[in-house]
Image (cartoon, rainbow, N blue to C red):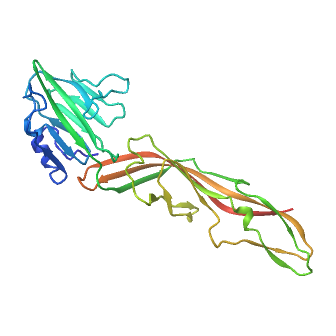
Amino acid sequence: MKNPLKPTSPFPHLVCFFYLFVFISCSKEGLNSRGGLIDPDYKTVTLKTGIIGNIIPIKADLWYVSYVKDALTGEMLRDATGKKLKLEHTGSVEVEDGWLQLEKTANNKLRLTLLENFSDQPRNFVIGILSADKQDEVNFIQTRAERYELVKKEITEVKGSRKIYVSAEGCTAMTLTNSSNQERKADITAIFKDVKYSSEFISENYGAFEWLKTADSSLFMDELLINGAVRWQGKVPYTKGKTFENYIKSGDKQELLLKPYAHIVVRGEFKYLERTCNYIFTIKNRGSGHEFTIKGIWKQKVPLTPHTIME
């Protein structure tokens, strides 16, 4: 993912790259009477985007991040081990869920990476800076972007993951009787009524399923080819976990010709195909142009061919 801002530039110049969608609001009064470490014009940052590796200028040679807290509740933010977020020496720390990372660089800069806020609730947090007897704060207010766009899909079927098998899963049996002396057609659609396509998305990435917030969350995935022929193509719901679609659609009908005075039991079987694919989605914040990637696994089961068995 490219950093749209130059992390080595002063913060006022960094913000210019987001001038349409990242707004810096001035604080008329310092957040701390002992301020002076942060330029007053940049103590409150309001934005609708994620940012990567941006430098926050600090007016001190010796400084450290003494706390990071929720601006509304005052609760201290913690890392994955449960420790309060602090940054004293060269290196980096990040919050438990990974949406905020702070780094003290080798040249004594404070570099900040902030992931997108996919919640409808604004994210409001404060970074406390301490240097000798001076203390100052930077207040961030981050809201969800108005729209995200899928700009690139990379889908790779896992080699050797295909499995083709015959199963009675989703099938049932029915008894048919023809008491007349004439052949007649019998509707046997019901023996396949519970046969389903299935799709399953798995991803542990931050915001993997939260960025797509529309009435129709379906996405086109790679078509299924068998010996060069398309056996499945279309959309599947992009959501965490499994979703299902009926094989039998409205208006579908399968019939069997019954001989005179026939009495038979008919049951169904199906040839299924299962496969696993890796996927990488590149998502763009339509407001700021900020891009990020989502990686995961997509599993699919496709009913291929019905079999009718008469007993």
Residue closer to the observer: 301 or 177: 177
Q: Is residue 105 visible?
A: no
- Residue at 68% from the left image edge and 52% from the top image edge: 165
Residue closer to the observer: 23 or 229: 23
- Residue at 12% from the left image edge and 48% from the top image edge: 16
**Number of numbered discs:** 0
Left or right position of 183 against 189: right
Left or right position of 224 against 12: right
Residue closer to the observer: 160 or 9: 9
Residue 82 on image: x %, y % = 37, 23
Q: Is residue 64 visible?
A: yes
User: Dividing the picture into quarters, in which one does residue 117 lie?
Assistant: top left
Up/down of 72 relative to 233, above or below: above
Residue 18 on image: x %, y % = 17, 50
Residue 229 on image: x %, y % = 57, 66
Left or right position of 241 against 302: left
Quadrant (top left, top right, bottom left, bottom right) of the N terminus: top left
Residue closer to the observer: 206 or 159: 206
User: Dividing the picture into quarters, in which one does residue 115 lie?
Assistant: top left
Quadrant (top left, top right, bottom left, bottom right) of the C terminus: bottom right
Up/down of 140 relative to 131, above or below: below
